Image (cartoon, rainbow, N blue to C red):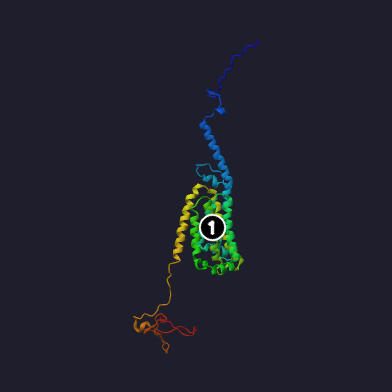
Amino acid sequence: MSKRRPPHRTRPRTRVRADGSVASASRARPGDASPDTKGKADATGKAGVSAAVSSARTGQPPVPAGSRLDFRAILAGTSFRRSLWPLGAGAFALLLSQGIPHEYGFLELGGLFTLSVYDLVLAMLGLSLGAAVAETRRDLVAIVCTFFGVLVVMLTFFDAIFGVILASPLGEVLYLIAPAAVMLTGASLWLSGRFRQWAVLLAAAVVAFSFSLFVGLDDLGVGLLDFAAGTVVSALWLILAPALVLRQFCGPWLTIPSRIVGSWLIVIGIIVLASLYVPMPLKGTTLPDPSQPDGGAIELQIPEDGSAPMLNGETLDLDGGTGQLAPEDPQAPVIPDKP
């Protein structure tokens, strides 16, 4: 006959620590977790997956939801140091250009001409911020390519396109394009999502069109390839170099700064637009005053004996108070009044 064994009861195993205390060796099984713990774990896993997907789309390191921006990790990263190279190289070249006396080439003159159009320079910096907060790298590339494409087409076929513009109603309001480009760039930074992307693309096209008018109507203009190439390179640097640096800090914390910059651009565009309608003071010669004797006429008398001429009856002091005219012969000696 087989003997029935008593049911085996599991007893918690104990282990003795180094300090003499006893620790329980029971371990929590996966199925023993509470529903609250499971929900938290699932939420954490989903948040991690969504952060990884968003980082893969934007090309940025994943940032957990609700965490603060780790500036130390970003500044120590390799991608941040690489993004500083275009910005630093352009700033260093500009300092050398202005600090070392030399003869300017046409390529360099084109780059400096871009920086002289102040209102459009601010609009380009606004486009740079719009490219920095773009959701994906494809959106950033689309903004830069739109600006570059419109600018190259306008400069290549400027004479033909400008003739068509002058024949159209747009030719009468060309002075309004620059302030409109600045205000449109500022307004686009106030939007969000896909609406902001489409607005920034439209602003990039308008800014490029306005800037091409400044370049084409300049004395050098598109007649010199080096000058036009310098303007294009400088404009692309203004848009792309700051965008690469700001993109390292991309996140929801850039929403408020972008809207502040957008508000400034709108105000600057309004000021530029208002200044176009303010009449400029005219500087000309003074007309005769009818209230003066002889109607304000000017009477100049030149004596034949070589003495000082007289203007309206008053002797003109031509030699500092000697009462004598300077000799007609420049090589004749001049006798001073006092030794």
Q: Nearer the viewer, residue 214 or 85?
A: 214
Count every numbered label the image shows and give the total: 1
Q: Is residue 19 above or below residue 259?
A: above
Residue located beneath label 1 in the image: 202
**Residue 116 x, y percent position in the rendering:** 52, 63
Identity of the residue furthest to the bottom in this view: 304
What is the three-letter code of the residue carrying label 1? Leu
- Determine if residue 105 is in view: no
Identity of the residue furthest to the top in this view: 1
Q: Which of 327 and 198 is in front in this view?
A: 198
- Determine if residue 243 is in view: yes
* Residue drawn at the location 52% of the way across and 34% of the way down: 39
Q: Nearer the viewer, residue 223 or 195?
A: 195
Q: Nearer the viewer, residue 165 or 205?
A: 165
Q: Is residue 238 above or below residue 220?
A: above
Q: Is mark 1 on a helix, strand or loop?
A: helix
**Residue 38 x, y percent position in the rendering:** 53, 32
